[in-house]
Every structure is written in structure tokens, then in C-alpha cells.
Image: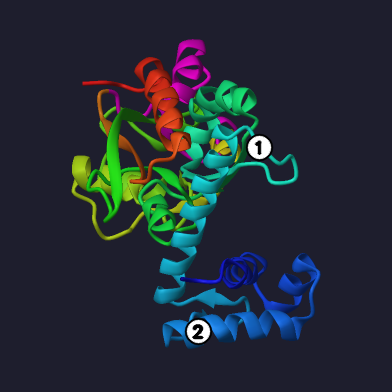
């Protein structure tokens, strides 16, 4: 059996990025924190932390953190079922989600659930192709991801497709794109992309135009709202989710650069296979919202 005070110390050290801040958080000395980690490492016979700045968990450390987070979730549910909720120990549900979903349909789907159950939500924002890594590492109990293959010990549920349209202002299109756009036009026109992790624009140009050499110019703006604002202000053209794009197309503020050339990105809800009502309740709410917001084949 593991000493859960030791596991808690491991979790806090990783969350705080070091031993000093963990000691302050736990109201104990740094040497006491170090001793707890050492005793835990002695028990498993492996190093659990990479002593860098910030401190990072090893692969074994990640497995223990995932176990600790699952136990915390189950204990929270047990307290609720036994009607012994401790206001000082609220249920915290950590979810990884992509920025486009967060900016549109995701949060409205969960507001009433969290208000009703008095849970606390902790969101981790990452590209939808990477969020499942946060689930794998134990940093989240569930995630919205593009990966349909369930991780070991997890379930994967299809939510729907987010459709992306390539859009720009009318003035931008007049400046950079002719009626029959060429690869040279695309190379000169500045694009707006979300971040270096976001490969959707690369896939779009490769699929429709066979461009694979990264020969285009691009702004990198890692904020869903600012990303869209940059396009609306004429800084560049980019791929915008249908939930954000449609009203702007209807008003004429934005125009499709390449009509009928769109990308559909499937979204899935992955969560741990543990008997905690939080993940099942959240999935039901997300699925119901996705029926109206996302594109269902």
C-alpha cells in the first residue's frame, strides 16, 4: 500500500514545479517534502522526479500521479454518496480541451452540471491532437481529443465533427487572391495559425493544393479569440470553426477564400475507466450539447 501523504506530496511538487513551493503549499518544511518523496522512491525502487526547473515526473511518476488522481476522484464521489461532503475538500474535475471547443460549445455544455453538483472545474488548454497526452499522464480525468483509439484504461466516445472554413476579409482576398488562386498566391498571402502544434493549416494546403514544403508565410496567435480577431482585422487568412465563422460569413465581414474546400475534424471524449459518476455525467452533457453544436454524420 502507498502512503497517500507521500503521493500527495508528489502531486503538489509536480503541480508547483518544485520543492520550495510545495513545502509552502503543504505548510511543512522543504526537507519534510524531500523525505516523503525519497520514501516513495525507495518503496517503488525508481526515481519519480526529474530534478529540473521546473520539476517534472518520470514515466513511473506519471503513473503514480494518475493513480492518485483517480483515487481522489473516487473518494470525492464516496463522500458525496455517504452525505459527508467536506466543504474544505471540494471535488475538482480536471479536463483537457482544445481552444476552439472552449471558445464555442464546450463550456455551455457543462455549466449547469458543475453548478448543480458544486464541483470545481480545472481546464487545461492544448491542441486537440495533444490533449490525450494529458489524460495519459494523469493530468486530466477526461479530454476532448481527435484520437479515436482509447488509451489503455480509458474509454473513447465520439462527439461529432468541427468543420473548419478557410476565411478572410473581402479586402484581404482582393489584395492576395485572384479568381483562380495559384500556389504562388498562397505562398505570398500571410496565414494565421494557432500555434506550432496546430497542423490543420498544413493538412489543408497539402490536401487541396499538394503544398507540403511549408513555403507559406504565417502569423502564430495561440488564442482562439485573438486568432479570429487577427483574421477579422485583415492580418491574414485562416481556418475557422463553423460555430465561429457562420455569423461572420452571413454578415459579409468574412468570406470563404476557397469555397467548398473545408476540413472536418472529429472530436472524441476520452476518460478513465473508473466507476466515478463525474466522467459519465460530463459525457452525457457533452454528448447532448454536441448534438446541436457539432456536425454529426
Up-down relation of residue 253 to residue 99 (above or below):
above
Within the image, what quadrant is residue 289 found in? top left
Numbered mark located on residue 84 in the image = 1
The residue to which callout 2 is attached is 41
**Foreground residue among 229 and 242:** 242
Instruction: Judge by depth and name the residue closer to the eye, 67 or 12.
Output: 67
Instruction: Please tell me how crowded label 1 is: few (under 14), some (14-19), or many (20+) other residues with Cα within 10 Å.
Output: few
> How far across and how far down the image is residue 173, in percent?
43, 30
At 60% from the left edge and 29% from the top edge, which residue is drawn? Answer: 114
The one nearer the camera, 204 or 70, is 70
Residue located 43% across and 86% down the image: 46
> Which mark lies nearer to you, 1 or 2?
1
The span picked out in magenta is 232-259
The percent coordinates of residue 128 (x first, y second) are 39, 46
On the image, the x and y values in percent for residue 253 come to 53, 19
Please tell me whether mark 2 sits on a helix, a strand or a loop. Answer: helix
* Residue closer to the observer: 243 or 69: 69
Q: Quadrant of residue 79?
A: top right
Q: Report the disc number at residue 219.
A: none
Let me know if residue 248 is in the magenta part. yes
Q: Residue 170 vs residue 85: left or right?
A: left
Q: Quadrant of the C terminus?
A: top left
Amino acid at each position: 500500500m502507498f502512503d497517500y501523504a507521500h503521493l500527495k506530496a508528489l502531486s503538489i511538487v509536480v503541480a508547483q514545479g518544485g520543492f520550495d513551493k510545495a513545502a509552502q503549499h503543504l505548510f511543512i518544511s522543504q526537507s519534510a517534502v524531500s523525505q516523503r518523496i525519497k520514501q516513495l522512491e525507495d518503496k517503488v525502487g525508481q526515481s519519480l522526479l526529474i530534478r529540473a526547473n521546473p520539476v517534472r515526473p518520470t514515466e513511473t511518476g506519471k503513473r503514480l500521479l494518475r493513480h492518485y488522481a483517480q483515487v481522489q476522484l473516487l473518494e470525492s464521489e464516496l463522500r458525496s454518496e455517504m452525505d459527508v461532503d467536506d466543504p474544505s475538500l471540494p471535488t475538482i474535475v480536471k479536463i483537457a480541451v482544445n481552444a476552439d471547443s472552449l471558445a464555442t460549445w464546450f463550456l455551455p455544455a457543462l455549466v449547469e452540471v458543475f453548478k448543480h453538483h458544486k464541483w470545481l472545474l480545472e481546464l487545461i488548454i492544448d491542441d486537440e491532437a495533444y490533449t490525450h497526452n494529458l489524460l495519459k499522464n494523469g493530468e486530466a480525468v477526461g479530454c476532448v481529443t481527435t484520437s479515436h483509439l482509447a488509451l489503455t484504461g480509458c474509454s473513447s466516445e465520439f462527439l461529432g465533427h468541427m468543420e473548419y472554413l478557410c476565411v478572410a476579409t473581402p479586402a484581404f482576398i482582393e489584395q492576395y487572391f485572384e479568381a483562380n488562386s495559384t500556389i504562388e498566391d498562397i505562398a505570398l498571402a500571410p496565414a494565421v495559425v494557432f500555434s506550432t502544434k496546430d497542423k490543420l493549416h498544413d493538412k489543408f494546403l497539402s490536401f487541396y493544393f499538394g503544398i507540403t514544403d511549408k513555403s507559406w508565410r504565417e502569423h502564430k496567435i495561440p488564442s482562439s479569440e485573438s486568432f479570429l480577431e487577427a483574421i477579422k482585422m485583415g492580418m491574414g487568412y485562416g481556418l475557422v470553426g463553423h460555430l465561429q465563422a457562420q455569423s461572420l460569413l452571413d454578415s459579409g465581414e468574412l468570406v470563404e477564400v476557397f469555397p467548398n474546400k473545408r476540413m472536418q475534424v472529429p472530436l472524441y471524449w476520452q476518460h478513465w475507466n473508473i466507476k466515478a459518476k463525474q466522467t459519465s455525467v460530463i459525457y452525457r452533457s457533452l454528448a447532448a450539447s454536441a448534438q446541436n453544436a457539432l456536425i454529426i454524420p
